[in-house]
Image (cartoon, rainbow, N blue to C red):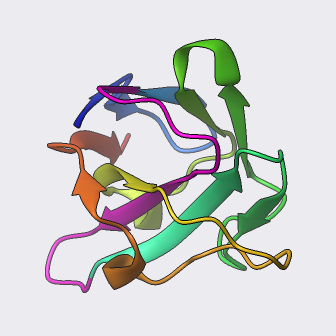
Amino acid sequence: VELTESGGGLVEPGGSLKLSCTASGPTWTSWTMGWFRQGPGKEREFVAAIRSTGNTKHSDSVKGRFSISKDTLNLTTFLQMSRLQPEDTAVYYCALNTLAYASSYIPWVAYEYTSWGQGTQVTVSS
């Protein structure tokens, strides 16, 4: 499985960016794609995730500013980021979980994801 991210860059505070991640390889009936980020000197943290069902989960720190969506046809996920702040500066990683969950649970812990992208840098600065 290969995950390819794109869309990172430099943006001013208050600006917007849209990240994309496409998974290539086998196809799965059930899956979850998530976004995590790691800022300078910080631990990797959960940002958002979306299941193949369309259910989503966003961390409290980005709720209302970021929105995750998907393109099922191509197993692609998007992270629309708005009202970006300097504290959003980080390397953003896309990750894939191919487990099927009987409940509405959405995995949000890093170890629940088995495949990871290389990461894309997002820098928010004036």
Query: Residue 73: x, y in percent?
Result: 64, 13
Q: Nearer the viewer, residue 21 or 54?
A: 54
Q: Quadrant of the C terminus?
A: top left
**Residue 19 magenta-drawn?**
no
The part of the image, by quadrant, that contains residue 47 is bottom right
Residue 35 in magenta? yes
Q: Residue 105, position in %: x, y? A: 76, 79
Vertical arrangement, residue 108 with respect to residue 122, above or below: below
Query: The N terminus is located in which quarter?
Result: top left
Expressed as whole percent of the image width and height from the top left, the position of residue 97 reads 45, 60
Is 32 displayed left or right of 93 in the figure?
right
Place of residue 120 in the rendered image (x, y in percent of width and height, measured from the top left) = 24, 38
Residue at the spot 55% in from the left edge and 78% down from the top edge: 108
- The residue closer to the viewer here, 123 or 8, is 8
Q: Which region shows up in magenta? A: 23-43
Residue occupying the point 17% across, 72% down: 40
Mark count:
0
94 sits to left or right of 70:
left
Q: Classify residue 124 as left or right of residue 56.
A: left
- Residue located 46% across and 84% down the image: 109
Q: Residue at x 27, y 69 (%)?
A: 38
